[in-house]
Image: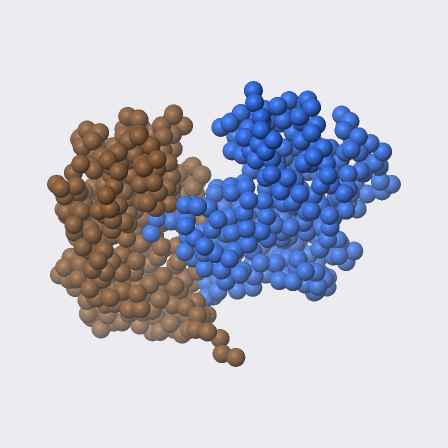
Chain colours: A brown, B blue
Amino acid sequence: MARPFQLSDPVRARQLADAIAILAPPRPVKIVHVCGTHEMAITQHGLRRFLPDTVEVLEGPGCPVCVTPTADIDAAVQIAEAGAILCTFGDMTRVPGTRLTLEQARSKGCDIRVVLSTDEAVRIARETDRQVVFFAVGFETTTPMTAAILLDDPPANLSVLVSHKKIPEAMGVLLGMPGTNIDGYLAPGHVSTILGLAPYRQHLGKFEIPVVVGGFEPLDILYAIALILRQIRDGKGFVENGFPRAVADEGNTVAQLLIETVFESADVRWRGIGTIPNSGVRLRPEFSQFDARARFQIEGVTGDEDIPGCRCADVLTARATPTDCPLFGTRCTPLTPVGPCMVGSEGACSIWFRYGGRELP
Amino acid sequence: MTHTDDRISPLHGAGGELMGKLLAEHVLPHFAASSAGRINLSDMDDGATIALPTSGELVMTTDSHVVKPIFFPGGNIGTLAAAGTLNDLAVMGAKPLALSLAVIIEEDFPIADIDRIVQSFAETLIGSEAALICGDTKVMGRGELDGIVINTTGIGLADPAIGDAGARPGDVVIVSGTLGDHGMALLAAREEFHLETELVSDVASIWPMIQTILPLGGIHAMKDPTRGGLAAALNEMARKSHMTVEIQQSDIPIRDAVQALSDLLGISPLEVANEGKAVLIVDPAVAPQILETLQRHPLGCDAAIIGHVSIDYPGRVVVTTDVGGRRFLDMPLGDPVPRIC
């Protein structure tokens, strides 16, 4: 009996690895992806074993928790200290702020709730008279969910601390930063189901480097890497869809409309990179009554992000691997994280610590 | 202070008439086996006695159980408490002799639920010939705990006891069945996910299965992969023996529904609890017999060899993935949380 086609089939994976070895140029190549789920898939499946030593794949600013600036954590702590119920995703509670993590704020008596979806924050708000604030982090995959709750008659005691980010803008800025030396992008499949391909063309087109949207199964990722290397071999650099079974060229227009209706572009700060023009969102004026920053008068909070010895900024800009950092695995472990890349479960350091990076034969 | 007949009141924990009635009507009748010596459960003395065995060593274990939801697909906190303690004894190679049952209940808890929980506890003991010989009941005020907490202590007889540190190079790693069923069934049952699945916990007493393989010998280490799942169990076995446990992902038995939910939530089935499984590290010479014997038992029909022991990375667990890559399987950090995107 024929086995069903598996996206982790070892024979096909080996064939793709052979193709990659033929396509790869003799010089070193640096491919960057910007998605924690990609790093998880690459590391959990041990895919670096299929790549020649000259082909390096690194996670850039792909972990939403990791790139959230200290100032936003500080704002969340301040709101919680003002007595509101602060709802957020699990990983956020352990990211260092200037004074406190949200976890530490909770142990000092603040009401911090870990939620699994935006709906849960709405439910909590409907069941109380207290102020409830949803700390909205994540890229274009989570932004539509935040937009959806604000368009669905939310309770008046709910507000949103917006910290959503736009990934194509950051990918463009990274290319212009000194020392990044990126030869090609493995673009995030999930985000691309929402955005489609146009934003990559808009923000990355002028750099003329390969940008290939990849899925998350082992064969998806190896295939996308092969497509990047083929573009490099052919001296080309364009946006290519390596994940057509999920990503349409135009993306998810309904989700795009949700984002567009509720949010407008804003210049926001990325931990490790700095402020990037139009790389985030803020609520449009007609939704400003749900802006937690206004409701709790959070203004001008700027956090200190300099952690002595920590190379998260280099890891987030793909200028270092986790194991290049002197703190990795010594002072900085998932149990005692120093920098944000060890905190977020999608952070490169956390993933490499748990599953091994390149050291396994 | 008032009380109704169908809810727990503070009086039920006060040691008086009402507590006696609760025990006589809702606890004691469930237990067929309540004696391991001269003084037994029905004597309601300050303690109970266990007749001393003539050889071997006594194994004692204790465990406190909290679970959310209290009733879940495949069992409830009573099943879990009994199986948890019996299985801790079983993977020590110990035949369970006697258990205690201490219950702390929140005021206003439905007595009908106590009945169901105690009945499940008693039913789980049946196949193991273990007796419930002593117990305790306390009631705490509303809001002071979440429903019900159960502590059980178990005493068993082993000859000799099997630890979890005895792995040797070349040994074979066996699991007694599919992994991740309990943890994923509980995650699916939690209301915040709004999921409807057919996942059922694997909670069961595994002593009846384990006793069929003990006479074969050659078991160098054994554990039940409860909290932290297979990942925690194998890491502990690797660390304590300073060996490397190497496993093959494609050989690990995992139900399709468990894998599907795991993919959806971003939580590995190897990092969530099992409540009716054993992980064994055995002498390669007897591995085939142990596997066959396990597979002949209904609880072990999905048993499989998943790897072997080496010395390459002392104290670590290495997985060869489905696709043919390699990675470490690390000790889980805490309760798994679903990823953001």
Q: Give the mark count.
A: 0
Residue A74 seen by the camera: no
Nearest to the observer: residue B58 or residue B133 = B133
The residue at the point 59 percent across, 42 percent down is B77
The residue at the point 67 percent across, 27 percent down is B19
Residue A37 seen by the camera: yes
The residue at the point 56 percent across, 64 percent down is B251
| Residue B286 in the image, given as x and y percentages of width and height | 73, 61
Q: Is residue A88 above or below residue A356?
A: above
In the image, farthest residue toward the top: B1
Quarter location, residue B298: bottom right
Q: Is residue B146 above or below residue B120?
A: above
Nearest to the observer: residue B107 or residue A99 = B107
Direction from residue B177 to residue A283 in the image, left or right? left
Direction from residue A146 to residue B197 in the image, left or right? right
Quarter location, residue A157: top left
| Residue A76 in the image, given as x and y percentages of width and height | 28, 33
Nearest to the observer: residue A180 or residue B222 = B222
Q: In this view, does B191 lie above or below A257?
A: above
In the image, farthest residue toward the bottom: A1
The residue at the point 45 percent across, 39 percent down is A335
| Residue A122 in the image, given as x and y percentages of width and height | 31, 41
Nearest to the observer: residue A288 or residue A126 = A126
| Residue B71 in the image, given as x and y percentages of width and height | 55, 44
